[in-house]
Image (cartoon, grey):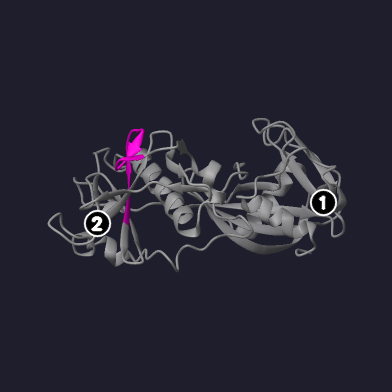
Amino acid sequence: MTVDETALPDAAGGPRHPVPVLSRVAHDRGHVARALPDPAGGRPVQVLTVGPDGTVPVAEDGGGPRLLWEQRPALPGGSVYLGEAGGVPYAAVRGERALTVSGRPVDRWAGLREIGADLDDLDAGLLAQAVAILEWHDRHRFSPLTGAPTTVEQGGWVQRDPTDGTTFFPRTDPAVIMLVHDGGDRVVLGRKAEWPPGRFSILAGFVEPGESAEAAVAREVAEEVGLAVTDVRYVGSQPWPFPQSLMLGFVARVDGEDALTVDPEELEEARWFTRDELRTGTGPRALPPPVSIARHILDRWVVGDLR
């Protein structure tokens, strides 16, 4: 199984960590009426509208893109409570694209893939969270047990089957993304047919039930390019909210023969590239964008930070 890892949020120069800034304490979600003010007074709620296509309103002010938040007196119906930062509560709601937000003009509507690397840590984390949780609601409107329409609770973080009371929580699917090297100066990169022409990236795939992340690395590499690997080492992680994955980054060294046998159902092409080709730009025509954990791992290997 493969996963498109080339446009992940929050990994420009290394995975971002918005948690110290944004409080996502679970018990606050269960008491949203207490955590958020009523319409009569108190702190307003900053609400982000996410369009049907996953884009959000953006303003350009010369310093890069910034999200346009709408100030509301209370948590609007159908929205999801994202958390609180600096005493300010944040929420997200699915809605239609508009030309203005709270009277401010929208310069453009853009997606997380386009602007994730250019947002500050707080907005990037909030946007990734908003996209992921709203996708979950879109895809899980009915109970998988009875087929009954679910009711939404705890600020949008729980769905309940009204017929038997069963609760359902957002899920996160683990996926591995791995840089495979020969122990020296070469790395394996592959490309999928649907990617832009000339783009190559490191390998990736989903973890199967009952499988460790390290075992998934070995299996995916064997499936995609026919190589055995050893010395599998964890590097870092990154959320992938399209719709609900967590990318677990690894490096691994080839064990034995280095001839590539490409599975055409997984990849269009795979090749060995040298560190010098990647450093000088004489290798692939395009690499994953800086926003991705794929590029983060690859850049670290090129400069010798990962061995």
**Do labels 1 and 2 touch, CB within 8 Å?**
no
Q: Residues within 10 Å of mark 1 (few under 14, many from 20)?
A: few
Report the disc number at residue 42: none
Name above or below for residue 267 compared with residue 134: above
Residue identifier under label 2: 44
Asked if residue 167 shows in the view, the reply is no
Asked if residue 199 shows in the view, the reply is yes
Which quadrant would residue 305 be assigned to in this image? bottom right
Q: Residues within 10 Å of mark 2 (few under 14, many from 20)?
A: some
Residue at point 67%, 32% (across, down):
196
Could you tell whether 272 is left or right of 234 in the image?
right
Q: Nearer the viewer, residue 156 or 142?
A: 156
Tell me, yes or no, whether the highlighted magenta stretch contains residue 173. no
Position in image of residue 263 (x %, y %): 73, 36
What span is colored magenta in the figure?
90-104
Position in image of residue 61 (x %, y %): 48, 47
Residue at point 85%, 42% (across, down):
282
Position in image of residue 65 (x %, y %): 50, 46
Residue identifier under label 1: 279
Position in image of residue 49 (x %, y %): 35, 42
Q: Amino acid at mark 2?
A: Pro
Tell me, yes or no, whether the highlighted magenta stretch contains residue 91. yes
Q: Secondary structure at mark 2?
A: loop
